Image (cartoon, grey):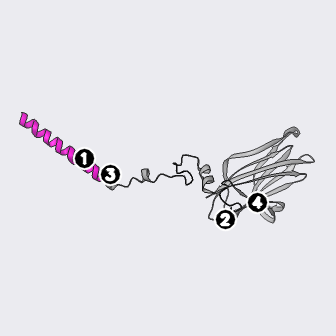
Amino acid sequence: MSEGNNGKNLILMLCAFILALAFLFTTNNIKLSYVTNLPKDDLTGSLETIDYAHHEIHEGNHYFISHLHTITSNKSILIRNNQSDKTIHLIYSLASNAEADIKLYEAVNITSSGTQWNISNNNRNYPDNDSVLYVSDGTVTFTGGEILLNDFVGANKNSGSISRENELILKNNTDYVFVVDPQVPSVKLSCLFEWYEK
């Protein structure tokens, strides 16, 4: 009986040894890309556990525009995405100190593109005004377009705002126009646009 048990033990040990060799051979020859190629942030070297938009700030691909205006009549703000190879991920906030109608039009036909605004990079180590987006106001005139947003802020002559926390991904080669129509003789309008390009 003991010789039989010794034989079985020897076979089990041999099988375990062969399995261990097979395991070592396999793990040494498989590239564990899901472990070794985890994305790292260029600035800090840390694993990318921040949200993606925050990562794009570190990469220098995240921009903003902040403007304050006093308006007495309709104001049109053009956002032109004339690119086919980059996608614009936009969030915005428009605030008024009094009543105003605010509309956003998509795919308009621009007849006058107005005066371009300066664009700032959210990573101050990267240059400004290198965004593919064109943003302007002044003598912006247009026809057509589909209304994406039709809102009213500042009820009862109080201040109000509209904002978008989720990204609006702009169509490529498409013009957008915000139109702000004050419902009182004079309105202070604050505009903030933020986006990244990929």
Q: Residues within 10 Å of mark 1 (few under 14, many from 20)?
A: few
Q: Is residue 104 above or below residue 81?
A: above
Of the numbered discs 1 and 4, the one sitting upstream in the chain is 1
- Left or right: 107 in relation to 24: right
Q: CA distance from mark 2 to mark 3?
A: 45 Å
Say which element carries label 2. Answer: loop
Q: Say whether marks 2 and 3 touch (CB < 8 Å).
A: no
Q: Amino acid at mark 3?
A: Thr
Tag 4 or tag 3, which sits nearer the N-term?
3
Residue underneath mark 2: 83
Disc marking residue 188? none
Of tags 2 and 3, the one toward the viewer is 3
Q: Residue furthest right?
A: 185
Residue 89 in sight in this render: no
Distance, label 4 to label 2, CA atoms, is 18 Å
In depth, the one of 42 and 55 nearer the eye is 42
Residue holding disc 4: 118
Marks 1 and 2 sit apart, C-alpha to C-alpha, by 56 Å
The answer to which quarter of the image holds residue 79 is: bottom right
- One can see residue 3 in this view: yes
Q: Amino acid at mark 1?
A: Ala
Dot 4 falls on a residue whose secondary structure is loop
Mark 2 or mark 3: name the one nearer the start of the chain. 3
Task: Give the residue number, with chain letter if any, for mark 3.
Answer: 27
State the residue in front, 183 or 107. 183
The image position of residue 51, as x and y in percent, is 59, 47
Marks 1 and 3 sit apart, C-alpha to C-alpha, by 11 Å
Magenta residues, start to end: 1-25
Location of residue 122 in the rendering, given as x and y in whole percent from the top left corner: 68, 53
